[in-house]
Amino acid sequence: MRLAYDLIGSRETGAVAVVEVPEGADPMEVAEEIMRRHPQVKSVLRKAGGREGAYRTRPLEVIAGSNETEVVHREHGYRLKLDPRLVYFSPREATERQIVSELCRDGELILLMFAGVGPYAIAIARRRDAQVVGVEVNPVAVRYFRENVRINGLGWKVFPIEGDVAYVAPAMSGRFDRILMPLPLGAYSYVRYALAALAGGRGFVHFYYWGGSNALREAEDLFRREALSLGLEAKSIGHRIVSSYAPRVSKMRIDFSVRPAPLK
Ligand SMILES: C[S@@+](CC[C@H](N)C(=O)[O-])C[C@H]1O[C@@H](n2cnc3c(N)ncnc32)[C@H](O)[C@@H]1O
């Protein structure tokens, strides 16, 4: 049987499988097949809809195994405790987290908007001698974020804040060297907060965007326009397709270098 599923968790603590049950397939057969292939799977969760709402969670139905769906996921040497029924998490983005942490530099103060359970913050703090302030609005995700900072021993480098970026970021404006904006379907509404949070109007912003074949051009144009309206100049210095969904629909990261616009 050809099956598309994600495993979240670990051999030590058990895992959950999140599966798209193919049309016409028997969910129980699908679940049994996954549990046979991966003995660490304690629950099989079926996707019962798309990601929705501000918290970007999706309805997941337990089709086999335990109703206890909290797990400790392991990637690249760190641990992330979470319940995929209550918070956003994608194990497929582990490589993206490593690439972003590589782009960060020692000594930086970094603002992670839309932090979730903290995977970007933890990946960066493990690799770099940098401090990361993470802002997240889902209180359950913040609870896991704090716990993840603790279990990875990073309490002196990573600082979770519960709240809406639109309210929290302005209270910290003019302080950061680098900003991450991992909310592909809405980060564009928060660009002005990111730009205002840069120290002296200078630094780097990693902007995520979701779109069709024109996505890169759209994202660059809207970001540069916002920057100019604040007297800043934004230069696109790189981009990466994080994942593709349908022909020509993708989630991408665009990297900007920002500085005060030169006087004409
Ligand atoms: C696409 S998820 C990414 C989470 C995390 N960065 C990760 O990669 O696992 C976006 C996250 O942003 C949070 N969020 C959405 N709007 C927000 C806002 N206005 N302020 C703070 N967090 C927000 C959601 O609750 C969700 O956890």
Image (cartoon, helix red, strand yellow):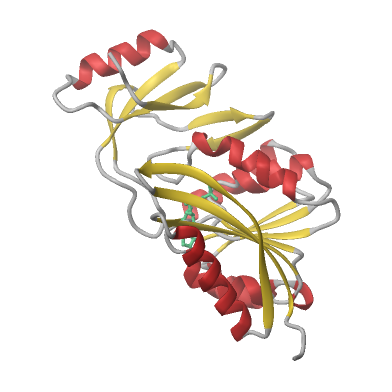
Q: Residue at x 79, y 50 (%)?
A: 156
- Which residue reaches farthest top? 36
Q: Residue at x 84, y 48 (%)?
A: 129
Residue 22: x %, y % from top left: 22, 26
Q: Nearer the viewer, residue 182 or 118?
A: 182
- Which residue reaches farthest left? 24
202 is higher (above) or lower (below) than 2: below
Residue 204: x %, y % from top left: 71, 63
Whether residue 154 is visible to the viewer of this picture, yes or no, is: no
Horizontal side, residue 45 vs residue 24: left or right = right
Q: Residue at x 63, y 84 (%)?
A: 230
199 is higher (above) or lower (below) than 252: below
Horizontal side, residue 52 vs residue 216: left or right = left
Whether residue 89 is visible to the viewer of this picture, yes or no, is: yes
Q: Residue at x 63, y 32 (%)?
A: 79
Residue 10: x %, y % from top left: 54, 22
101 is higher (above) or lower (below) than 44: below
